[in-house]
Image (cartoon, grey):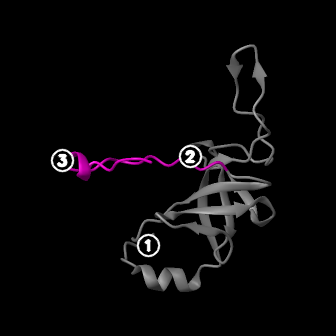
Amino acid sequence: MSASKESEGSPLRPHRITRYIQPLGLRVLVRVLKEDPVHESGLYLPEGSKEKMQEALFGEIIEVARAHPQDNGGDVSLGANVSGIPCGAKVLFPKSEGLRVPWDDSLRLLDVKYVLATVEEVGLDQTH
């Protein structure tokens, strides 16, 4: 049986919770990246107008599914990436796919099979 802080007479202090999501199976955690609301021509486009036309979302992989951790003499590693997509990769995926994380609308838990492409961003001076 545990006692609550209120019954001890001390006031409840708000505390911060840090949540760590580890995708299971062949899934990745993607942070949806928002585009600049100003069009190339300098016109401001409201969010609703752009979202209606979009078929895919652009995001960054922030966590991947991993094999079970190995204990190598006290050194516990995270395990190998089993998703096939590296952490930090920029990807395109259908906007209708993926589960939204309840406490953060910018995060989606996505099956690897729905990743349409990886995107490499290069500067204009690096193109051919």
Q: Nearer the viewer, residue 9 or 96?
A: 9
Q: Position of residue 64 (x, y in %)?
A: 69, 47
Left or right? Give the position of 56 relative to 111.
left
At 40% from the left and 79% from the top, the residue drawn is 45
Q: Which mark lies nearer to you, 2 or 3?
A: 3
Please tell me which residue lies in front, 21 or 73.
73
Residue type at mark 2: give it.
Answer: Gly
Q: CA distance from mark 1 to mark 3?
A: 57 Å
Does any portion of residue 9 appear in the rendered image? yes
Q: What is the span of residues highlighted in magenta in the rendered image?
A: 1-22
Sooner in the amino-acid sequence: mark 1 or mark 3 = 3
- Secondary structure under tag 2 reads loop
Q: Main secondary structure of the magenta part?
A: loop
Percent position of residue 67, x then y: 80, 39
User: What residue did someone put label 1 on?
Assistant: 39
Residue 123 shown left or right of residue 111 in the figure: left
Secondary structure at badge 3 equals loop
Q: Which residue is rendered at x = 63% and y = 47% of the image?
A: 63
Mark 2 — residue? 123
Measured Cα–Cα span from mark 1 to mark 2: 19 Å
Which residue is under mark 3? Answer: 9
Q: Find residue 74 and report its image quarter.
A: top right
**Mark 2 residue crowding within 10 angstroms, few (<14) / some (14–19) / many (20+):** few
